[in-house]
Amino acid sequence: MLRLLRRRRGALTVRGALTVAGGTDPHDGVHYDVLVLGEVLVEIHAGTALREAADGTPARISYSGDALNAAAAAAAAGARTALLAVVGDDELSVPLLDRAAALGVDVSHVRRAPRPNGAYLLSADTDGDREFVYWRTHSAGSTLGPGHVASWRDLLTGCGALVTSGITGALSPSSRDAVLAAARLVHGAGGHVTYDPNFRSRLTGPAEARELLVEIAPLTGLLKASCPADARALVDTADPGTTAARCRALGARTVVVTAGADRLLLDDGTGAAYLPVPVNPAPVDATGAGDCFTGTTTARLVLGDTLEDAVTYGTAAASLSVSGRGGTGRVPAFSETAALAAARRGNGVPRPSSPAP
């Protein structure tokens, strides 16, 4: 059974979703501003550098994954948001879904699989440098497939936007097919698609990631890439401007390229411009900052903000997020995000005149 927690800003928030692949969603017909398709992970945060993790090293359990991070950010930005994912049948599934619901994300459409949940061990120092060890082979999240997407068809064709990533597409062949199927449904219905390649060399190779990028780019309203990490592997360059141009040549309507911690390049086809990112004076952990950007920016686009305003809010939220430890350790309220964005504009940040994609 589903236990309703509360209504927040008109969004249904549920706890302990027990639907199964191919089942009927209890809230079919509910319109969502943002749907996020992807993986949720158990996060184990070590209290020391991983190479120094001796017997007895303390650690903290939390919940993350690029899909949960982006969904939490979209919900915080004011969007009615739901998570489309597959979670396991182990004991950690209950607190995992509880955490997502507490972040304002509707989990009533999440499916179950008789597999363990994926997990990762993380260490971050006060300068934000990070180390990761992942356990996700044969995880519940990797069973995501076209059958799940078919069961979510009405949700996808009726939503404002879909957020998904190359990480989701790299989990398994069926996950790759699911990413493309979902993006095609949303694009075909006139919705917005945000895609982050999020290239991870431990998860996939450059050739496979490029193939997925080529197929999904023409479906996207916003494609976010990092330079040089994504750029070198996927479009053979370490230059942000060239990265944006090559992604747009693949069919992406608008491209954002993060180029270090303090700036990003925005290219919407009318010209490319560098925009500064607000500097967080006390960074703790940059895990999930890019996901916070995509979730916030997508939410604000769907809610009617211009492209410039949505990106400004996205960079502000991402900057604030690095004050927390872990992917969802600091999800800023939109009031905080808006205040930082307003202060940034007050410092003379240029305002491009491009409309929302």
Image: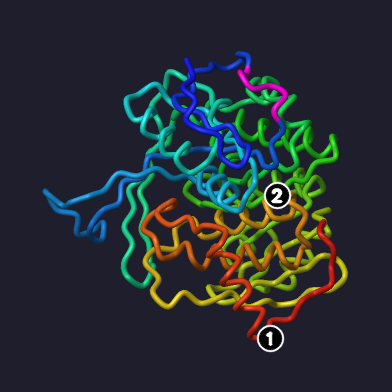
From this viewpoint, which residue is outermost toward the right? 270
Secondary structure predominantly adopted by residues drawn in magenta: loop
Relative to 99, residue 115 above or below: above
Q: Which residues are magenta?
A: 25-30
Q: Is residue 28 magenta?
A: yes
Residue at (55%, 56%) from the top-left corner? 292
Are the residues at dot 2 and dot 1 in contact (C-beta closer than 8 Å)?
Answer: no
From this viewpoint, which residue is outermost toward the bottom? 348
Instruction: Point out residue 121 in the picture as x, y percentages from the top left corner.
Output: 32, 48
Relative to 267, residue 22 above or below: above
> For mark 2, what is the residue?
194
Q: How many marks?
A: 2
> In the picture provided, is 19 more to the left or to the right than 208?
left
Q: Residues within 10 Å of mark 2 (few under 14, many from 20)?
A: many
Residue at (84%, 72%) from the top-left corner? 353
Q: Is residue 95 magenta?
A: no
Q: Quadrant of the C terminus?
A: bottom right
